[in-house]
Image (cartoon, rainbow, N blue to C red):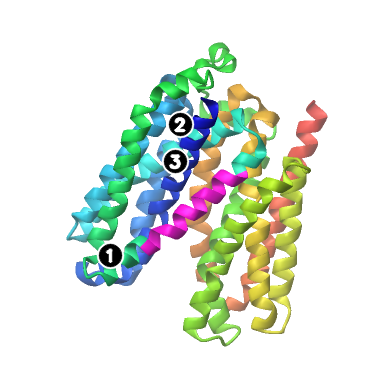
Amino acid sequence: MIQLLLALIYLSFISLGLPDSLLGAAWPSMYIEFGVPVSYAGAVSVIIAVGAVISSLQSDRLTKKYGTGRITAFSVSLTAVSLFGFSLCHSFPMLCLWAVPYGLGAGSVDASLNNYVALHYKSRHMSWLHCMWGVGASAGPYIMRYALTGGKGWNMGYRYVAFIQMALTVILFVCLPLWRKSNHDIINTQADKSEKKALTLKQVFRIKGTKEILTAFFCYCAIEQTAGLWAGSYFVLHNGMSANRAAGFASMLFIGITVGRAISGFLTFKLNDVKMIRLGQGIILAGIILLLLPFGETVSVPGLILIGLGCAPIFPCVIHSTPEFFGADKSQAIIGIQMAYACIGTCVMPPLFGVIANVISIALLPVFLLILLVVMFLEYEFLLKKIFVDK
């Protein structure tokens, strides 16, 4: 029964990734049809992120009230309906309207599922589950490309993914008894029986180590998204690479993350979460150093791949170690805020570097990433000192 539930969670993580890359794949066709500037994609992303932040912050209260199974099923259904709404849009305002429930659904299920896996499964499953997210995120553009090359338009690409999400919704609702039979659902845990009331933001920030882990997580997400967004431009403007070649090489970051998480799952048999995070930080540092070297694309592309491989274990291992560091009764609240910080980091820091690149030089990308890495390293080490001293 537990293995069947785990398979269902793996399927859910693939579905989480499927819609995340659709907007980028479809936008070149969408903005022309809507008659808006190409930059308006950022507005849609911000709306989705704000919705995700709001629902992530509410995940503790909602999960304790309804349980992970129900939250997952409802959130995926909300995402499915929103994606179907996207497929019906023929104006930019309508797209923005449907982006609101999409963000709300995505944020809630992400926080709830991550906490559930952190509480009940080993670290390797967290790494492999996030690898499955990467599989879903990689498959999304191929589904959109199939729709576009088949002459069906971007609307049908969104509709295909909406149908997949609807099918998963049915499976999730049918399989709700699995969560109860596994005796693992959060509403049944001993921690939750003793702590029914959801923690407020003020209470969470008073917990020793919370500020440090949130700052470190913010910096990690900023590194991943800033490198992912600006690597192609860095290759073109700093290394003199052609736009076509740069577009292909820029995807190496996400390939590195996906492959790295598959490998990380096996490494966790020997290394604990703290060692995996430190290993990831060291590999990111090696990648940034390669970007700093004045040897052009010969070292820049391997540097980007190393950054992706280094990023691979950090997200899942930070999440997985949260119940151990802060307690099972507090982990849902903290992971919910971590997801919110992830959204904020991905929304704020890549545009901030865009301003720096425009005003000064895009050559500062590795320096920007290095500063974020140093802050992340220091905050994580401060966290460990607090946690282990306290214990």
Amino acid carrying label 3: it is Ser
Q: Which mark is residue 147?
A: 1
Q: Residue at x 73, y 48 (%)?
A: 267
Amino acid carrying label 1: it is Ala
Q: Which residue is mark 3?
A: 12
Q: Residue at x 51, y 86 (%)?
A: 242
* Residue 120 x %, y %: 60, 28
Tag 3–tag 2 contact (CB < 8 Å): no
Secondary element at tag 2: helix
Q: Quadrant of residue 66?
A: top left
* Front position in the image: 120 or 167: 167
Taking the magenta stretch, the answer to whether it contains residue 74 is: no
**In the visual, does 35 lie left or right of 335?**
left
Q: Residues within 10 Å of mark 3 (few under 14, many from 20)?
A: many
Q: Which residue is mark 2?
A: 59
* Residue 23 x %, y %: 35, 60
Q: Residues within 10 Å of mark 2 (few under 14, many from 20)?
A: many
Does residue 10 appear anywhere in the picture? yes
Taking the magenta stretch, the answer to whether it contains residue 134 is: yes
**Cα separation between marks 1 and 3:** 23 Å
Q: Residue at x 66, y 60 (%)?
A: 309
Amino acid carrying label 2: it is Ser
Q: Which residues are magenta?
A: 127-142
Secondary element at tag 3: helix
* Residue 209 x %, y %: 69, 35
Q: Main secondary structure of the magenta part?
A: helix
